[in-house]
Amino acid sequence: MQVSGTLTELLRSDCATVVLTGAGISAESGVPTFRGKDGLWNKFDPRELATFSAFMRNPKLVWEWYLFRRELISKVEPNPGHFTLAEMGEHLSQLHIVTQNVDNLHQRAGSTNVIELHGNIERNKCVECNAPMAEFEIDPDNLPTCQCGGRIRPDVVWFGEMLPEAAIETAQQEAAACKLFFSVGTSAEVYPAADLPMIAKKNGAYLVEVNPHATPLTPYADEVFAAPSGEAMPLIWHAVREQSS
Ligand code: APR
């Protein structure tokens, strides 16, 4: 795998850079993706587990699903893909990480400027008044309610729901303004997140895709690393650091 001179030069120039991440960046940590071969949506029906109507219909089932995923995520660690982005964040002054992941692994790897498009699995909120609820231990057989009487749900974005306004607006602005855009570990099929690489491309950014498999975005990428992000991201950053030393 070669890193082009164009890419190393852009990173060394400390230009405005956006990194969009998806489930693939957490795959090497042991967090299943959604649509890959062993993807969650091949085994579970998202209409029964990841929609507002499913939650109101059967909150116990949906909570059992999110508690299963919380448990799984609590047992894994960030991987070199996450750690490299955290290190890049320490050296680059205009790096924005925009994630579709709810697993908190970017933050656990040390990244601070993470824009969460789909919420965070470690947070809860009220379906009525949106008040956050800190309590982490949720008993599916005795689900907590908010002071307002509303049900408590995981603070994640479900299919058919709007993304957090501030997060998507900031992501769109940064995508339009960046000179370099990385799409890492996402199938680029879920909107509006999948729009972001094209917004960047249309505004003249250099588009890099990191994904072992081709996606609808691959034909538009200026540079493709058809490899796991836990290998490609350290390689890319090492090439930049090597030239700086
Ligand atoms: N490194 C990089 N990419 C990888 C790796 C890896 N080690 N392993 C798999 N991938 C790629 C797959 O080839 C696939 O293209 O990661 C992508 C994961 O795609 P999805 O499972 O569709 O996940 P994502 O794109 O994040 O899904 C978007 O859909 O289900 C909803 O809300 C959920 O945020 C999620 C959104």
Image (tube, rainbow, N blue to C red):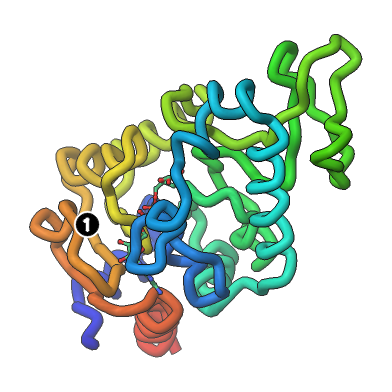
> Compared with residue 192, is residue 80 higher up or lower down, i.e. above or below?
below
Left or right of 57: which side holds 151? right
Secondary structure under the numbered disc 1 in the rendered image: strand
**Residue drawn 45% across and 79% down?**
230
- Where residue 53 appears, as percent x and y from the top left, is 54, 22
- State yes or no: Cβ of the residue under disc 1 lies below 8 Å from any atom of ligand 1: no
- Where residue 209 appears, as percent x and y from the top left, is 26, 63
- Where residue 22 appears, as percent x and y from the top left, is 42, 55
> Compared with residue 39, is residue 193 higher up or lower down, i.e. above or below?
above
**Residue drawn 16% across and 52% down?**
216
Left or right of 93: which side holds 138? right
- Residue under label 1, please give it: 207
> Compared with residue 11, is residue 28 higher up or lower down, i.e. above or below?
below
Tell which quarter ligand 1 is in: bottom left
> Compared with residue 193, is residue 219 higher up or lower down, i.e. above or below?
below
Question: Quick one: quadrant of the C terminus?
Answer: bottom left
Q: Residues within 10 Å of mark 1 (few under 14, many from 20)?
A: many
Q: Extreme left residue here?
A: 219
Determine if residue 70 is in view: yes
**Residue drawn 47% across and 50% down?**
44
Res 160 quadrant in image: top left
